[in-house]
Image: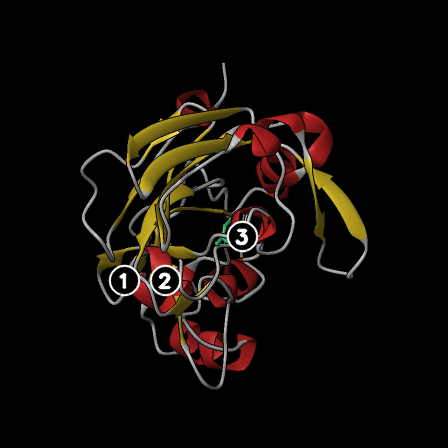
Amino acid sequence: MRIDKYLSNLKYGSRTEVKLLIKSGFITVNDELVKTDKFNIDPNNDIVKVKDEIVFYKETINLIVNKPRGYLSANSDNFHKTVIELLKEPYSRFDFKIAGRLDLDSSGLLILTTSGLLAHEITNPNKKVNKVYHVILKNDIESYQQLLDGIIIKDGKNNDYLAKANKIDIIGSKELEITIDEGKFHQVRRMFQAINNEVLELKRIKVGKLSLNDLKEGTYQEFERSDLFD
Ligand code: URA
């Protein structure tokens, strides 16, 4: 890959700004000064330095984020803080895909990945990846069998959709964990609305094999594909 493309992809500046960095003698590869922007590097093996600092690079990065309420699952937004704004250097230099959004008012496990393939594997409905949500309801739970049998809700396009829970674990009179392998717009909230209840708090705690565990709210850590899938 050309050094100027590599560095501008990593947000060290526009192609023109990176060319200026090169001209000014700020870039080395394996401790050799780079003199031309046409210089090619092997991003996985070469050690690139900008102003004497090593550039962090990985072909694929997967992050598990503990999203706080009030953060939008989007790359940018004019009104709300976004989950991408939680990222610090060096992760803030990469372009992430959000693999399965959470509502503004929901919290918990959100997956960011630079791999389009992994994002697809997580969100493709045919893959049936289980997601576990911890839910606090407004009213006492009376019957929830309908959610396991299947219940009609509206999907994001306002069409009828038969939503089905795989598992429900009751924790208290208004508290439970629900497992679904689908991901329609506002699905969990709409499923409880359909049985005349209301979700007050919604937190995703597990996706596939990957658990939030004690990851602090607003923080993140890297994971491998094998932490998620068998
Ligand atoms: N279901 C919802 O209703 N909201 C979420 O954020 C996730 C699942």
Ligand 1 closer than 8 Å to label 2 CB: no
| Residue 88, label in figure | 1
Tell me the amino acid under the disc marked 1. Lys
Is 149 situated above or below 16?
A: above
- Under circle 1, the secondary element is loop
Rounded to the nearest angstrom, the CA distance separating label 1 from label 3 is 42 Å
Tell me the amino acid under the disc marked 2. Ser
The location of residue 165, given as percent across then percent down, is 57, 30
Mark 2: few, some, or many residues within 10 Å (few <14, many ≥20)?
some
Tell me the amino acid under the disc marked 3. Asn
- Under circle 3, the secondary element is loop
What residue is at 29 percent from the left and 37 percent from the top? 212
Give the image quarter of residue 68: bottom left
The location of residue 20, given as percent across then percent down, is 44, 80
Mark 1: few, some, or many residues within 10 Å (few <14, many ≥20)?
few
Rounded to the nearest angstrom, the CA distance separating label 2 from label 3 is 42 Å
Q: Is residue 102 visible?
A: yes
What residue is at 63 percent from the left and 55 percent from the top? 185
Is 163 situated above or below 97?
A: above
Callout 2 touching callout 1 (CB < 8 Å)? yes
Is 52 situated above or below 118?
A: below
For this orientation, the residue located farthest to the bottom is 78
Callout 1 touching callout 3 (CB < 8 Å)? no
Residue that label 2 marks = 92
For this orientation, the residue located farthest to the top is 230
What residue is at 29 percent from the left and 39 percent from the top? 173
Rounded to the nearest angstrom, the CA distance separating label 2 from label 1 is 5 Å
